[in-house]
Image (spheres, rainbow, N blue to C red):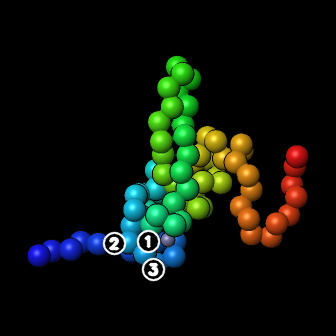
Amino acid sequence: MELQTKTCETCRLKVVFAPCLGCGAGVCETCVQFELIGSGCGCVWPAYYCPKCAWDPYVNPNAAFRDPPKEKGGFTSR
Ligand SMILES: [Zn+2]
Ligand SMILES: [Zn+2]
């Protein structure tokens, strides 16, 4: 039996749930950031990002619309 289980590249504790659409790093079910990408023709499809890419506007077109990461709890805009 061959178990090619990779560990999450964010927390390095859990098994990879999905690859990040942005950088390709494996992310576990806990760290994964689920995003719905709109294509403009009315259809949306699910995308999985690692926490880094989820808030990176260069990677995730929806990053600007996301709530900022809950790290410092700072109020930016809005
Ligand atoms: Zn993780
Ligand atoms: Zn990533």
Q: Position of residue 50 (x, y in %)?
A: 53, 60
Q: Residue at x 41, y 57 (%)?
A: 19
**Which amino acid, mark 3?**
Leu
Asked if disc 1 is less than 8 Å from ligand 1, the answer is yes
Answer with left or right where residue 39 lies relative to residue 26.
right
Asked if disc 1 and disc 2 are in contact, CB closer than 8 Å, the reply is yes
Asked if disc 2 is less than 8 Å from ligand 1, the answer is no
The answer to whether 9 is drawn above or below residue 21 in the figure is below
Residue sitting farthest toward the bottom: 13
Among the two numbered marks 2 and 3 on one chain, the one whose residue lies closer to the N terminus = 2
Q: Residue at x 44, y 71 (%)?
A: 8
Among the two numbered marks 3 and 1 on one chain, the one whose residue lies closer to the N terminus = 1
How far is the residue under mark 3 from the one under mark 1? 6 Å
How far is the residue under mark 2 from the one under mark 3? 10 Å
Answer with left or right where residue 68 lies relative to residue 59.
right
**Which amino acid, mark 1?**
Cys
Q: Residues within 10 Å of mark 3 (few under 14, many from 20)?
A: few
Q: Which mark is residue 6?
A: 2
How far is the residue under mark 1 from the one under mark 2? 7 Å
Residue sitting farthest toward the front: 30
Answer with left or right where residue 37 lies relative to residue 25.
right
Q: Residue at x 46, y 64 (%)?
A: 29
Q: Position of residue 48 (x, y in %)?
A: 48, 51
The answer to whether 40 is drawn above or below residue 30 in the figure is above
Residue 28 figure quarter = bottom left
Q: Position of residue 75 (x, y in %)?
A: 88, 58
Element at badge 3?
loop
Q: Which mark is residue 8?
A: 1
Depth order, front residue of 27/53: 27
Q: Residues within 10 Å of mark 2 (few under 14, many from 20)?
A: some
